[in-house]
């Protein structure tokens, strides 16, 4: 989830003209489709801060099936009960989000 950031964009507007500036927000779009057989799972996107174990929660699932995220490497962590009623945590393979691009993730939770 993007935090509040103050950014200034210089825009030239001339009399009787239409301005169509391009604003670089340094964010990428993640379009996701997630299917679960059991439902009721807690899912959140985690961003790697560096190559060690430092990570941060970047956002959860939403009804729009898309998120705007900082560029970086992410994975999805799913927590909930499996088909046998045992609580477990699953993590997907990692994927990259690039500024100005859309990354698509299709995930099936067993």
Image (cartoon, grey):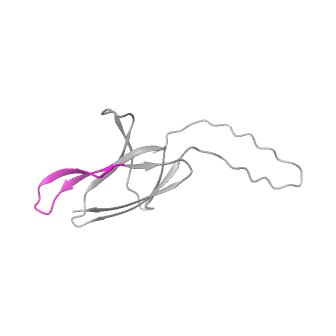
Is residue 101 covered in magenta? no
Residue 1, percent across and down? 45, 45
Total residue callouts: 0
* Residue 106 placement (x, y as % from top left): 36, 62
Tell me which corner region of the image, top left, top right, bottom left or bottom right, holds residue 58.
top left
Q: Is residue 64 left or right of residue 85?
A: right
As displayed, is residue 28 above or below residue 53?
A: below
Q: Residue at x 53, y 38 (%)?
A: 4
Q: Residue 47: where, in percent of width, then height?
A: 38, 42
> Where are the magenta residues, as a range?
76-94
Residue located at (25% from left, 60% from top):
40
Q: Residue furthest right?
A: 15
On-image quarter of the C terminus: bottom left
The percent position of residue 12, horizontal first and vertical second, equals 81, 44
> Magenta span has 86?
yes
Residue 32 found in image quarter? bottom left
- Who's the residue at 41% across and 62% down the image? 63
The residue depicted at 63 percent of the width and 37 percent of the height is 7
Left or right: residue 86 versus residue 55 is left
């Amino acid at each position: 989830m993007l935090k509040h950031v103050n950014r200034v964009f210089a825009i030239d507007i001339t009399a009787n003209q239409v301005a169509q500036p391009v604003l670089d927000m340094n964010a990428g779009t993640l379009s996701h489709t997630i299917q679960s057989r059991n439902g009721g799972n807690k899912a959140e996107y985690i961003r790697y801060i560096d190559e060690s174990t430092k990570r941060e929660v970047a956002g959860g699932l939403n009804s729009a099936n898309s998120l705007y995220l900082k560029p970086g490497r992410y994975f999805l962590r799913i927590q909930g009960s499996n088909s046998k009623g045992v609580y477990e945590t699953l993590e997907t393979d990692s994927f990259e989000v690039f500024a100005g691009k859309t990354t698509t993730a299709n995930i099936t939770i067993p």
